Amino acid sequence: MQLNRSTAPEFKTINTFELLPIETFQLDNGIQVHLMQAGSQEVTKLDFLFPAGSVQANKPLLSSITGKALTEGTSQFSGAEISEKIDYYGAFIGQQAQFHHSIVTLVTLSHFLPETLALLEDIIKNPSFEQKEINTLINKRRQEFLIESDKVKTLATRAFTQNLYGKEHPYGNYLNLEDFEQLTREDIVAFHQKAYIPQGTHIIVSGQPGKQLKQLLNQHFGQHWYNGHPLPDNEPPQNIQPERELFVPKADAVQSAIKIGVPLFNKTHPDFHGMQILNTILGGYFGSRLMTNIREQKGLTYGISSFIMTYKHAGFLIISSDVKAENRELAVKEIHHELQKLKDEKIGDEELQLVKNFLIGDMIRNFDGPFATSDNYRGLIDLNLSPDYFKDFFKVLINITSDELQRLAQKYFKEERIISVVAGK
């Protein structure tokens, strides 16, 4: 059949949003399981969320190194043997440490689920934490730290969050070189036994795990392997008044890194959905106002963007760009101009509809299939939010007006709330 290229594809407006069904159940020991059974492939993804983040660790490096060391050897297998088994089954096991959780992820062919879950059980419950492997992980992390610490964008980011929360606050507490010498194997062993426990743990399962899922999870993870209560995860105190302007000098810098933003809140705040839409207009997509002005019209940078960072207890909106030193003042001026413009002028109907269409399409892409859905759903666990959160965002997106967006800009982009950080020479 020959395509008629003179006729554009039919355009359809999406007015509803449906989320994949999520089933929840408990294992015998109380672990919460969240199941999204969907998809056409016999593949399963499992995310184990342990209450073992950097906030619970309360010591730099402890959470991340503990997670990375899990796959470096157990009482039964060496790290090399674990890697061989993962490759043999065509599986993937990864780890990441966040502020309030450490996540262990398994992606496996569903018919190998009995074998890969048995391997994962050994990794989670019986890590050997050999000193040689720990040293290798710490040395690798040290090299990454040294490389990153030489970048102006890293210096600016650290200065921004430390200025916002304080250097002792978990959200602003960055590594120092001496931290790499102070982490011991004893720290890691003790933290693993206290934090990798059933209490407070969640398992998110997506894909097509088969009818034996509940039995397999109970067999390998439904018992008490360590007894105890989760480590403290209380809201940290925040009693500092941030400085409005900071400069971080770096004599040999070719470019300057700019970080300009405002303190916000977490996803439970009633204005959060609206601020996501406002942020998109400001700098959240390629056709945003910041990109149009500062990249396309002024030619001051290759890229500029804004985004909202949210944590369990706080959040902020930040504008980020790297520019030549001689363009720094003009770039900062134009950023403030775009913030002021959102306060002074209503967004036009055509621009607002364009952004709404973009976000609707982006939302459909972000929830395309069970794996993508589980990645988004994972961000709700800390806050005890239901999946209705996403439907609520869609409703706000469809109905929000220019008047409401201007009200949000006037409320949160007040001059006295804006924090500007620049790193460079």
Image: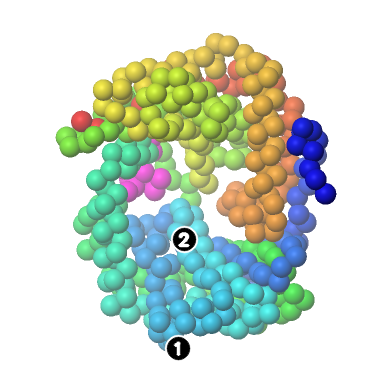
Query: Could you say where residue 297 lies in the image, as x and y percent from the top left?
Result: 45, 19
Q: In the displayed orientation, state which residue is furthest to the front.
A: 2
Query: Mark 1 and mark 2: span between their CA atoms?
Result: 23 Å
Query: Could you say where residue 184 lies in the image, as x and y percent from the top left?
Result: 28, 70
Whether 248 is drawn above or below 178: the answer is above
State the extent of the magenta-drawn residues as a range.
162-174
Numbered disc total: 2
| Of the pair 409 and 295, the residue shown nearer to us | 295
Query: Could you say where residue 337 lies in the image, as x and y percent from the top left?
Result: 45, 15
> Is residue 422 among the parts visible in the rendering?
no
Query: Could you say where residue 153 lies in the image, as x and y percent from the top left?
Result: 33, 39
List the residue tagged with mark 2. Answer: 96
Left-right relation of 413 to 375: left
Residue at the spot 57% in from the left edge and 80% down from the top edge: 89
Could you tell me the amino acid type at mark 1?
Gln
Could you tell me the amino acid type at mark 2?
Gln
List the residue tagged with mark 1. Answer: 76
